[in-house]
Amino acid sequence: MSAVRSLRKLGRAALLGPSPRHALPDAIEHVAKAHRAHHPRADLDALRRAYVLAESSHRGQTRKSGEPYITHPLAVTLILAELGAETTTLTASLLHDTVEDTEVTLEQVRAEFGEEVGYLVDGVTKLEKVDYGAAAEPETFRKMLVATGNDVRVMSIKLADRLHNMRTLGVMRPEKQARIARVTRDVLIPLAERLGVQALKTELEDLAFAVLHPEEYTRTRELIRGHNAGADPLAEIAESVRAVLREADIAAEVLIRPRHFLSVHRARAKRGELGPCDFGRLLILVAENADCYAVLGELHTCFTPMMSEFKDFIAVPKFNLYQSLHTAVADTGGRVAEVLVRTHRMHRVAEAGVIALGDPHRASGASGADPAGETAAADDGRADPTRPGWLERLLEWQSHAPDPDTFWAELRDDLAQDREITVFCTDPGGPGRTAALHLPAGATCVDAAYARYGAAGHALVGARVDGRLAALGTVLSDGDSLQLLMAPEGTSGPSPQWLEHARTPTARIAIRTWLDACAEGGERSEGAGGQARTAPPSAAREPALPPAAVPDGPPAVPGGPRRAARPRQRPAAVAGMPGAPVRLARCCTPVPPDAVVGFAVRGGAVTAHREGCPTVARMTAAGRETVSVRWQDSGAGCRVTLHAESLSRPHLLADLTEAIAAEGAAVVSAEVEPPREHRVRHTYTLRLEDAGELPRLMRAMREVPGVYDVVRATSPQP
């Protein structure tokens, strides 16, 4: 009822017309009073002139409730004034509907009030349905978000505008109420949360809750009424806390902060029946950061702490700049109270978010700055909220959204992520090159690649998380150390499976764009191990290498002359049994200068194994006698089996074969196992002309992009 009376009062004041020239109109006296509570020395002349223009241009217009239209911009401006907005924001708020709904032009606003006010008014002005049709709403939000990227005050005005519209939504048709409430829930409320404007967010949540879930809202309202009818046990706990803090000589204000309707509903859904202390929290306000921890120490000393409920958002603020200590304590009667501890300044920022931080252009001396300079600007070295990480990401991906429907769907999905994490990405190009990536909670290695490299993220072939190899779909945690393994540009690309791993619009839009381009003119190619990957249109199909024996001579290096057939080498090893031929075991393929041991086999021959081969241990345990074996010539040719562990990507088999050929080795046989979690194992049996070249060959194979390890075989081959 108080809101209705306020509207009627504003309406009567507006109908009386403007006050004499240079006097403050009666209709904005309450706005001026709220404004001066935060900015005592603010110059109100711009507010007076803005009201005169708004009142005269909206004269004769009424809202659906029948009230004079001027009551709407006045109410929006009052909301912002009570939250501490500076004069430029309030001036633009009074004028925010003039360009959209009256004959006033944007050029007139700029000429009369300056570029800043003109920018803010333009930012919140809707696009015409006549020009954009069904795309008008999503494109209006796109325009508004782009404008917010340069000045967050645009979104502050929009949030206050939506709050007043939601307060007066009852005069609309039910279906229109539901449509507006859904957009409020899916878009505006998450934006209010991300900008830290909790005072607007909580009221918007309750208003949308009442429209979209009327039965649950009614039950919750009755539950709260029943609780309020009796004595609140939190009052007794609050008095005990005051006594403890007085005794500790800590100056603090202890308040009871009731939960709003949706918060009570969520708590009941999570906990079942609510206890008498579950309808509110204790809020403790102190002067300095150090006092917050002093209060925490007293609480945990004099009451029983619930350590699972403790969170320190002072040391680690939320991505929307929210800071508080959260804890829960039980008194001697076992009653548990949730407690928030913060400074008065933290409380202003928690309630009003970016609005409390003042004019984002004040440091650069913009014309619209508060002349008194009394904004609650950030002074503790934290990040400038005018370009937070989530907004940077949003502005980046929206520029690539091809149509309004994609933008609208991706915007809702992006805003549904209500938490942010930070991972530290190390560039493999050199030591010390580490970048902090701010990602939404639930982001994966795929999301990190596109956040770090943009469209070049297509070349991702693997990742290490905290030093360990991880699948591309691995969900990252706050504080993870990440190394992204990238293939050479143009040699790899995303598969459709990546869409299942991508959580951010930046990644999803880039992947879909790639896949659509390939579907139009490209073709499918098989990645290593047979995993299907989508290749760009220019990629050629790679022939498979059969796992069959090949001639002794190594294959030709692409583009180079063919090697002549290698002449037969004399035996590389001799046994302690005179005249016995020596065969090198295929299970471990020993080469000089490996320590070797032999076993006599049928036909009078000796099979030589590396000393560490599992077969040696097995045969020794079975009682087989060993035969001494020595290398005859370290420069003799040899045969060796290598396992190459790699991350799946197109053309990997061809690149590995080319690296082997370039080192002069002959491929006797090759086998590629099916990929598992993007990892592929290649097994090569090779013949080398000189065993001393083996270390160099293994290094060359490891340098192939996507290969993370090459080892000698130590177990029998199938």
Image (tube, helix red, strand yellow):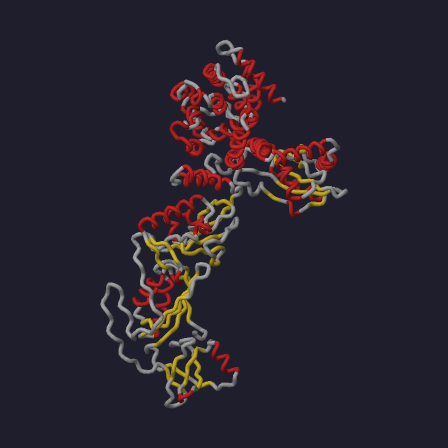
Q: Is residue 666 left or right of residue 92?
A: left
**Residue extending farthest top:** 20
Q: Is residue 496 left or right of residue 224?
A: left
How many tags in the picture? 0
**Residue extending farthest right:** 333
Identified at 73% across, 41% down, the residue is: 335
Identified at 43% across, 79% down, the residue is: 609
Residue 558 pos. (x, y %) = 26, 64
Q: Is residue 525 above or below residue 218?
A: below
Residue 328 pos. (x, y %) = 67, 42
Query: Is residue 265 visible to us here?
Result: yes
Q: Nearer the viewer, residue 264 or 31?
A: 264
Query: Is residue 291 visible to us here?
Result: no
Which corner quadrant holds the C terminus? Answer: bottom left
**Residue extending farthest left:** 561
Which corner quadrant holds the N terminus? Answer: top right
Q: Quadrant of residue 135?
A: top left
Q: Is residue 415 left or right of residue 659?
A: right
Residue 508 pos. (x, y %) = 43, 46
Q: Nearer the viewer, residue 105 or 514?
A: 514
